[in-house]
């Protein structure tokens, strides 16, 4: 198998066509997209890629979590080299986070087909559902279902952002919560899993490097904090008699970056991404505020330490302000290491293709996190302009996506020979 | 006319029946009510009182803003002594804010009827619409329409809390924005306006006084602040590169009570009652936050000064945090003085009825504010347990409401004789 013929077979036109079509599904008119998981927009994007897979001769099936899998060559059995990503987005998210990995995976198969290389084991393209967790507050939902690592107790109480129970969300697209466990697959089914993704940071752009070879993914903890005071009229009572839940929340919000800075670690992050005040009316002192807090670190112990620090500080602030404080961990995603031989294979492919690359950590979680429990994994990052992501301004030039698809195709072809 | 016969004619049973019926309309199951203006619940409450008015022989009509007016004796022309309040509520508000004044006004007419006193001028009970401003972000909407002091430029852009244009809100209950100006009434139509209201503070309860004789109403300014940063993924980019709009908002929220305290005035208030973050998802740095800020003071100049101080400080915080800051005044309600002769009449009525009273300021705006441009006005406060208001815990014992109705009936009967 010649890497040169693969490089030539990767089609910039096909990638552009697929990316442009997906960008219009759920387009928000401001350059971004809103494709919440299991929404009509998400399902339309999924149907488009399904159709592209079938046109390329892949055998397509879907599972009980809404993941889509396309396999080639048809009829070839045994463990597969899988590649993929997701098509769901955050509200008003970007056009690249997810679709780049799906389109590169599909293009890698199409390029391998055209190069004349007949792989000794099957290739599989996977489109995972609800990677973002923006709908169910549970990121990696689809890939966790495939890995069999969804917590059944959480599933029973799980609701979407509008309070709709999980069972009804799934029924809305013809899926059934009762059959969710059927999505589970086994280690024996996979040789490896590879994912192309936008960096979502600005390191590659700033250093003018084409490809990031990911060595590990940071761990993430999602916490929910509920601050309860007492709703009251904004006029009559003296200020000092108030139990203002939003004032307590404000103090917590301003304190979190201080605690993150105190860790002294460049890999630590703390974010309050979501806030809901109640009753949320201009002339009423807020009686209750809920905060969604996101804590990240590359070390398992450090993330726990930071989450605990933030939790203690928030509780302390509330106590001093006469407010009640309740918090709970919504999700804990442990840091993940990439397989050494895959890290090495990606680096070698870049070198052979004259593509510049550097090793780096991923600050965001990915479907690769779940897949690491089923297979050796590797990730290929392409640059994000100004490091912007989860917003309409998210951007990656076409030539960088093409570059990602080439490295993915080359790495996949190389690995599948070695594995088999 | 004997005050004693009036005292006896005020019916605790009728007041209890009316208050209990209203409490069930829009009940939130937690002791509170949600009756947003022009909602089906608001309209149902209005229909109940309309029916009670008609049963008591009042001649009822409605105006283009949704205010309801009932007049007695039927056929008697000339300027009226008006009494009233409102039936709309904030979301999850209390059962007493508004209904107490409506029920007391209606009961005052019924008691005067039963006492055998035939007033030389008509009495009028008015139920104002959208006093709270919780639906349209514009408090005193109905009473301002009656006073002819709604700003026509504001009307054109006015939307409700869900973004529905004013015209469609009004159409929903069969009203028309084009006819709104027809709600306007003239000074010649009124002798005076009286309103019973819960104190919404704890002064009367703490001092064990039955009635508050209001001497003035504080001024209120509603401001909207829009803080714009940049939505970004919570993981990859370093914290110091963020433009976190919620962090800026948190700093503003914590600074406002400091600025209020610095005024050194017990009559100053500053509240952030409403917050909306965008995109409001746990793993995205918020790119935009909107705050609803409520500023109050009894002096016209002081409220402007405080609002300006808060605005400047918020702008300063945003500039230092690399955030854009836009603010605008949504509503300015000037402080209002009660008519001296009415303040005196209420005090004398209390004395004659052996009811304890004290003079006080109102920290909240009321329909009386708008009515002060049409007539001499007076307000009668009844105690609020623990000073709680705009929440399900809002409470006033039945005997205190009965006391308010007696003072209202006595004051109205006394004034109408003097005026005529």
Image (tube, coloured by chain):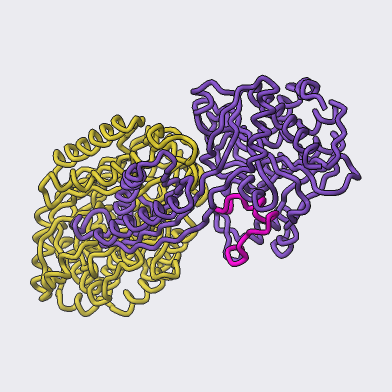
Chain colours: A purple, B yellow
Please check the rendered image and state whether residue A141 is part of the magenta-colored stretch, yes or no.
Answer: yes
Q: Pick whichever, A366 or B325, lies toward us.
A: A366
Which of the 4 image quadrants contains residue A102? top right
Q: Residue furthest right?
A: A75
The spot of residue B250 in percent (x, y) is 32, 44
Q: Pick whichever, A136 or A124, lies toward us.
A: A124
Q: Residue at x 40, y 59 (%)?
A: A226
The spot of residue A155 in percent (x, y) is 61, 63
Image side of residue A249 versus residue A2, left or right: left
Image side of residue A235 versus residue A358, left or right: left
Magenta-highlighted residues: A135-155
- Would residue B146 be seen by someone viewing this image from the given angle? no
Above or below residue B56? Residue A297 is above
The spot of residue B342 in percent (x, y) is 13, 58
Q: Residue at x 20, y 46 (%)?
A: B219
Which of the 4 image quadrants contains residue B93? bottom left
Q: Pick whichever, A321 or A125, lies toward us.
A: A125
């Amino acid at each position: 198998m010649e890497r040169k013929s693969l490089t030539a077979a990767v089609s910039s036109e096909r990638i552009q066509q697929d990316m442009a079509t997906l960008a219009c599904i759920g387009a928000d008119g401001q350059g971004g997209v809103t494709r919440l998981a299991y929404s009509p927009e998400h399902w339309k994007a999924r149907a488009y890629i399904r159709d592209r897979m079938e046109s390329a001769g892949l055998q397509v099936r879907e599972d009980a979590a809404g993941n889509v899998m396309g396999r080639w060559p048809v009829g070839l059995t045994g463990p597969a080299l899988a590649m993929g990503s997701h098509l769901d987005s955050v509200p008003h998210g970007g056009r690249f986070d997810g679709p780049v990995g799906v389109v590169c995976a599909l293009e890698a198969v199409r390029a391998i087909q055209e190069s004349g290389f007949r792989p000794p084991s099957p290739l599989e393209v996977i489109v995972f559902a609800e990677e973002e967790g923006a709908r169910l507050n549970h990121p990696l939902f689809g890939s966790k279902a495939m890995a069999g690592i969804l917590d059944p107790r959480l599933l029973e109480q799980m609701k979407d952002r509008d309070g709709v129970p999980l069972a009804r969300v799934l029924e809305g697209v013809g899926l059934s919560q009762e059959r969710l466990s059927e999505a589970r697959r086994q280690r024996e089914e996979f040789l490896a899993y590879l994912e192309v993704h936008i960096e979502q940071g600005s390191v590659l752009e700033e250093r003018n490097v084409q490809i990031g070879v990911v060595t590990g993914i940071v761990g993430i903890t999602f916490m929910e904090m509920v601050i309860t005071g007492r709703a009251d009229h904004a006029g009559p009572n003296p200020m000092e008699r108030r139990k203002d839940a939003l004032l307590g929340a404000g103090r917590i919000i301003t304190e979190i970056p201080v605690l993150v800075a105190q860790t002294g670690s460049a890999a630590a992050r703390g974010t309050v991404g979501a806030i809901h005040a109640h009753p949320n009316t201009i002339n009423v002192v807020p009686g209750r505020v809920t905060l969604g807090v996101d804590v990240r670190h590359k070390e398992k112990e450090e993330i726990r330490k930071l989450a605990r620090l933030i939790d203690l500080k928030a509780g302390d602030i509330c106590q001093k302000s006469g407010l009640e404080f309740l918090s709970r961990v919504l999700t804990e995603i442990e840091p993940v290491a990439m397989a050494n031989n895959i890290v090495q294979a990606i680096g070698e492919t870049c070198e052979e293709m004259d593509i510049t690359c550097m090793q780096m950590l991923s600050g965001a979680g990915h479907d690769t996190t779940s897949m690491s429990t089923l297979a050796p994994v590797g990730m290929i990052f392409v640059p994000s302009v100004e490091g912007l992501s989860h917003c309409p301004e998210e951007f990656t030039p076409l030539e960088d996506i093409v570059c990602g698809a080439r490295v993915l195709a080359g790495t996949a072809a190389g690995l599948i020979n070695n594995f088999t």
